[in-house]
Amino acid sequence: MAPDHAKEKLPRVALIASERMVYEYSTLLPHLLKGLAEETIPVGLVCPPKRDCDSVVTTAAEIIGHPIFNIPLMGPVNTWLLTERLIRFKPTVLHCLCESQAQITRRLAHRLDIPYVLTVNSLQKRWSSLAISQTYCTKIIVPTPTVAENVNRMQSRFADRIEQINVGAVPMDTVTCFSEPSKTATLMTAHRFDHVDEYENLFSVIRHLLLDGYEFMMVVVGIGRDDSSLWRLLTALGLLHIVTLVPGGMPWRSLLAAGDIFIRPRPRYDFDPQLLEAMSAGAAVAACKGGVDDLIIEDQTAAVFNPDDETSILRTLRRLLDRRELTRQMAETAQNYVRHNHSMSKMISSMIQVYRTAHG
């Protein structure tokens, strides 16, 4: 009989994330960390040392702040400090959770001489900035078939390392969409408003709905760098009285619980965790196709419109507001789709298997 010390050793995992990734996946990360902790897998989370990042994680992970000095020319010092912290943590596997951290993860894997896993969430036109180590990168995780196809096309030599793992979610027990018939409808959107002109069509339609006599409120979450332009646009259209602007960092689940219709007004070329959470909460979705749109199945999980055609957007939102029972049924269908295809426990078990394989 093999002695106890010969049993399989558990991997020690260091997750490496950007500030944006921690914010956008603020609902997912605590579940992932808790799931790994329940399997007694030690986890370190490398992320910017900010209060917002600390608020979305639990005691299940050791927080490793990076960069410590967020000023120019301190890159080498920050990398050295991070390397020292990781040496003390003693990871056996690194997991880069987003492409923006791919370069430093690759560098750390070389310095520490350990394998790493890379998650690719977006469609890439050029891969020159996403150098992947032939020696140390053991797996490339993608969230959807669309992203998998893109990675396979752009990085065909790594085709055998690509694995699709659906992003996990925890669907609510109830459907939030029009759960109170007498309540004023609430429309929501959550995007990076760095180019406000891309959203003029949506807000023009919102104004048109008001002029047609529709009663609703609108919540806009996650304002980007161009928030002053957004304010000017809303002022010009006379929408400030019905639009609430919510800064990033607010509890996303709590906001969704009060919403009826979630709108994705433009294609996103990376996986949209907020869209997944809206479906998970039981909100009806109005969205456009394009980019990473695997979650959007017309008239099943979402009502689809042409983002460049105001008439198309208007017709879609009118239909959702006028036919509340059908809208609620579509929201329930989307929630069930998430329940059957985006199991949190399955995602965690798949991740653990990837870590065990990389750990060897």
Image (tube, rainbow, N blue to C red):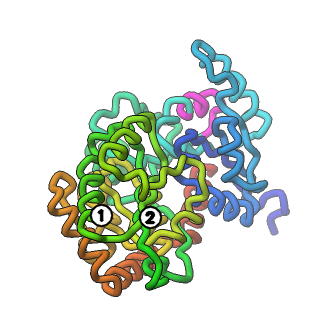
Image spot of residue 280 (x, y percent): 48, 71
Q: Residues within 10 Å of mark 2 (few under 14, many from 20)?
A: many
Location of residue 279 with respect to 123 vertically, above or below: below
Circle 1 SS class: helix
Which marked residue is nearer to the observer: mark 2 or mark 1?
1
User: Is 292 in front, or is 108?
Assistant: 292
User: Is 242 in front, or is 137?
Assistant: 242
Q: Amino acid at mark 1?
A: Leu
Q: Amino acid at mark 2?
A: Leu
Q: Exactly how many numbered labels are in the figure?
A: 2
User: Is 211 in front, or is 294?
Assistant: 211
Q: Quadrant of the N terminus?
A: bottom right
- State the residue at coordinates (67%, 57%): 33
Magenta span dominant secondary structure: helix
Circle 2 SS class: helix
Mark with earlier residue (2, 1): 1
User: Is 55 in front, or is 140?
Assistant: 55
Residue that sits furthest to the top in the current view = 73
The residue labelled by disc 2 is 276
Q: CA distance from mark 2 to mark 1?
A: 28 Å
Magenta stretch holds residue 107: yes
Location of residue 155 with respect to 312 vertically, above or below: above
In the image: residue 117, left or right of residue 200 = right
Q: Are marks 2 and 1 in contact (CB under 8 Å)?
A: no
The residue segment tinted magenta is: 105-114
Image spot of residue 247 (x, y percent): 54, 47
The label on residue 210 is 1
Image spot of residue 189 (x, y percent): 40, 57
Q: Is residue 144 visible?
A: yes
Q: Is residue 151 visible?
A: no
- State the residue at coordinates (44%, 74%): 184
